Image (cartoon, rainbow, N blue to C red):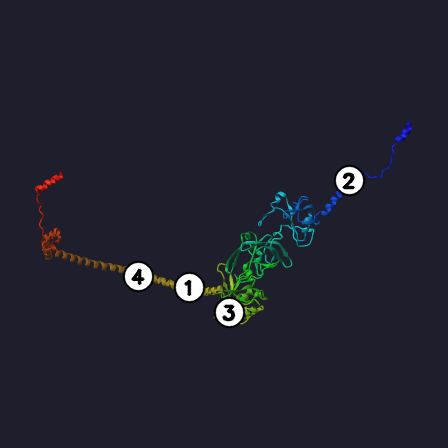
Amino acid sequence: MSNNSLAEDNEAIIKESKRISKIWLIPLVALSIGLWMVYYQWANQGPLITIEFVSATGIEPDKTKIKTRDVEIGVVKRVALKADLSGVIVSARIEPSAEHLLTSDSNFWLVTPRVSLSGVSGLSTLLSGPHIAMEPTENGVAATNFVALENPPVTEAGTPGLQITLNSAAEFAFKEGDPIIYKGLKVGEFEDIYFNLEERIVYYNAFIEAPYHKLITENTKFWNVSGVRFELAANGIEVQTGSLETMLTNGVTFGIPEGIPAGQQITKRAYFDIYSDYEEASNERYKLGVNFVVLIKDTVRGLTVGAPVEYRGLEIGRVLEINMPTPDSGKILDGGLAIPILITIQPSRVQQPDNRTGVEFVRRQTIHWIDQGLRASLKVGNLLTGGLYVDLQHYDDVEPATAETFLGYDVIPTTSGEFAQITQKVTSVLDTINEIPFKKLSGNANTLLETLNKTSTSFQQAASRLDGLLLDIQDQKMSANVNETLSNIDTLLKDFSEGSNTHDEMVNTMQELQTTLSQLTPLLQLLNQKPNSLIFADGTQPDIEPKAANSNNSEGNQDNEK
């Protein structure tokens, strides 16, 4: 075979292939897996929510966690400013398992270390950093946009107890976390505050913990116990304090005033007023009253709105208004117009029903008593404070009063108060003193003093002369007494001198006495030796004479001695 034929036989035949290589299966599988993973991640990822904060202090994307009950349920993805620069918008991804917790009533807040009078919280974030806490709730509808709370909620959701709303038109300054006290125990707290601009009333949402929520009834009253309160009233000085916590911050307490039934227990949110003190809360039961006007011509200094109205020592009402405005009130400066005081007498305080029937009875009875001498006056309730109160009493020596009205109110006649009576008495005494003719009395007194001076001088001279006369008389009488005494002594000495009868008689008597004593000497000696000689007839006994011993006896004695 030739070389050409061999070359032709060795030429490769090239044919175009139409089959795909198997090597491309690897990237296709990888792409499929990646797409499946992306789809799976997209299909199973949790919802993206937005939370509005005032500032983004401590919040970082992909680092700041979202937790509920210390369980991580999401993470912050993005932080951006609001268009109006009023805050920041935080976008966060929530775990699918926690999606059902996202409702419109859920709360979010930033957990950071906080120190307050209520305590210390958030210390764990000192090491781990701030995180966003979520308070889930089953109430509300599904939502993805939220506004964070500036402070953590006071009461956690689900805590057993009772939600109530307190309101006050007074200038109380409560804040979130302030305590609610019952008999010294903290049983609840203020949660949030809302001020109604139209009503100008502050509303406080508060929570009473279980089991103390069972104490809340329809007749429960709340009153302020903030700080230390000193009250100077007609009854004296009153000091009111709560617990140590309320002395440092603010707080309220509650209870059922004495004399009011307990009522039914409250089981759902209810509204209660906050009173300034227990007395005001207790007086709230007296809803109706009969208004009267008392025209006072004395001073009203020390009388305050709210001062008691008493009848024979029993409180039956209150002072509502002092110096009621009238068209001719300018005449008060002229001193010719009495000051109108508006008072109210409450039927419930005089054991009458708190309704229209009781009001009408009190009005008729009071008008009837006016005809029987009922009069009003101002009296001092306490000398220390100078507080006044309106006192109603029956007087027998008053002039009959005619029915009067003032601005449509019945007028109770008045009598002078204690200060006015004292002033009248003092004025009367001063007038009497002024009527005394002191100048004339002074002249008469000077004349009297001069006369007394002259009389005193004359009396002194007479006394001197009398003293001299008495001394002379005394000297003469003493001399006569001395002479008489000396004469008597001389006579007595002559009677006892030698040769006189008295001397001889005394000598004879002494001799006879000596003879008698000599005769009695033997008898006395006998009695001294033998005392029984006067009893026995013969008291003499023979004297015992000693005898000599015989020879035998002498020998025996000698033997014995040997």
Number of numbered callouts drawn: 4
Q: Label 2, label 4: how many angstroms apart (C-alpha)?
A: 157 Å
- Point out the tag, 1 or 3, that comes first from the N-terminus: 3
Q: Label 4, label 3: how many angstroms apart (C-alpha)?
A: 68 Å
Q: Label 1, label 3: how many angstroms apart (C-alpha)?
A: 45 Å
Q: Are marks 3 and 2 in contact (CB under 8 Å)?
A: no
Crowd tier of the residue under label 1, counting other residues whose Cα lies within 10 Å: few below 14, some 14–19, many 20 or above: few
Residue drawn at 11 percent across, 41 percent down: 556
Q: Nearer the viewer, residue 99 or 356?
A: 99
Q: As drawn, is 326 to the left or to the right of 95?
A: left
Number of the front mark, 4 or 3: 3
- Point out the tag, 1 or 4, that comes first from the N-terminus: 1
The percent coordinates of residue 494 (x first, y second) are 12, 56
Q: Amino acid at mark 2?
A: Pro
- Point out the tag, 3 or 2, that comes first from the N-terminus: 2
The percent coordinates of residue 136 (x first, y second) are 65, 51
Q: Amino acid at mark 1?
A: Phe
Q: Label 1, label 2: how many angstroms apart (C-alpha)?
A: 137 Å
- Point out the tag, 4 or 3, that comes first from the N-terminus: 3
Please, is residue 9 above or below residue 304 in the view?
above
Residue 438: mark in rendering: 1
Secondary structure type for disc 1: helix
Number of the front mark, 1 or 3: 3
- Point out the tag, 1 or 2, that comes first from the N-terminus: 2
Please give the residue where the numbered disc 4 appears in the rendered image: 459
Number of the front mark, 2 or 4: 2
Q: Amino acid at mark 4?
A: Phe
Please give the residue where the numbered disc 3 appears in the rendered image: 374
Please, is residue 19 above or below residue 261 in the view?
above
Please give the residue where the numbered disc 2 appears in the rendered image: 27
Number of the front mark, 1 or 2: 2
